[in-house]
Amino acid sequence: MLVLGLDTSTAAVSVALVELHREPDGTPRWGRSASWQQVDARRHGELLATGIAQVLSELAVPATALDAVAVGLGPGPFTGLRVGIVTAAALSDALGVPAYGVCSLDVVAADDDGGGDRLVLADARRREVYWAEYDTDGLRLAGPEVEQPAGLAERVRVTGWTGRLLGDGAHRYAEHFPGLEVAEAPRFPGGEAVVLLAAGRALAGAPSEPLTPLYLRRPDAEQPGAPKRVTA
């Protein structure tokens, strides 16, 4: 089966098309794959369609050949995040295939082969980070949450945590975490890891899921309320 993976929760737009097979014991096996990623925080809407067309072309299959779609649900900034989620929902509806959501911080952790305890940090803007903690097996122990880097660093210091830091937020705010290793990669969620986290559900033929974004905080732009009365 062919599964399309998308993520627009960060400054990167990531897309992958993966051919999945089921082993006799039920575990997923990967066949052909194609991936595409570009970092540009201002052009998610323009770039996502380009990336999808690129991976479909690379494997020489039409969009109608897709069997499922998987997408990163964040956490991430409101505008960029909804581009990927709306696109996944639209493809699912138009093609009549299931759509599955995954936490984008889980995607970064799943794409890391360094082992050990890890903190994944994504840039949340406003001088904050989205973060989650993972053990050596990739199990999420805490988060996702949003916090200022200094506050998170203080908690790390107090608890004596000594794992590795992953993600773009770790690179941006490395000065707050002296003495801890900041992994060079993965820096952003990758499309293939999105598919990896959804592979079990896709191969089992699980029904489509609600694609609920993980915003963790209110968007900057809000609809104004009713005008206040200034007279009795």
Image: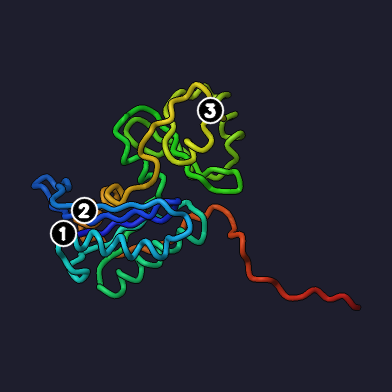
> In the picture, residue 230 is in which quadrant?
bottom right
Q: Residue furthest bottom?
A: 232
169 horizontally vs 8: left or right: right
Residue 59 marker: 1
* N-terminal-most mark, 3 or 1: 1
State if disc 1 and disc 3 touch (CB < 8 Å). no
Spatial CA span between label 3 and label 1 = 42 Å
231 to the left or right of 49: right
Check disc 2 and report the residue beneath it.
Answer: 34
| Residue named by callout 3 | 177
Which is in the foreground here, disc 3 or disc 1? 1
Residue 183 position, x and y percent, is 39, 31
Quarter of the figure with the N terminus: bottom left
Q: Residue at x 31, y 65 (%)?
A: 208
The answer to whether the residue labelled 2 contacts the one labelled 1, judged by CB atoms less than 8 Å apart, is: yes
The CA span between labels 2 and 1 is: 7 Å
Q: Nearer the viewer, mark 3 or mark 2?
A: 2
The residue under label 3 is which amino acid type?
Phe
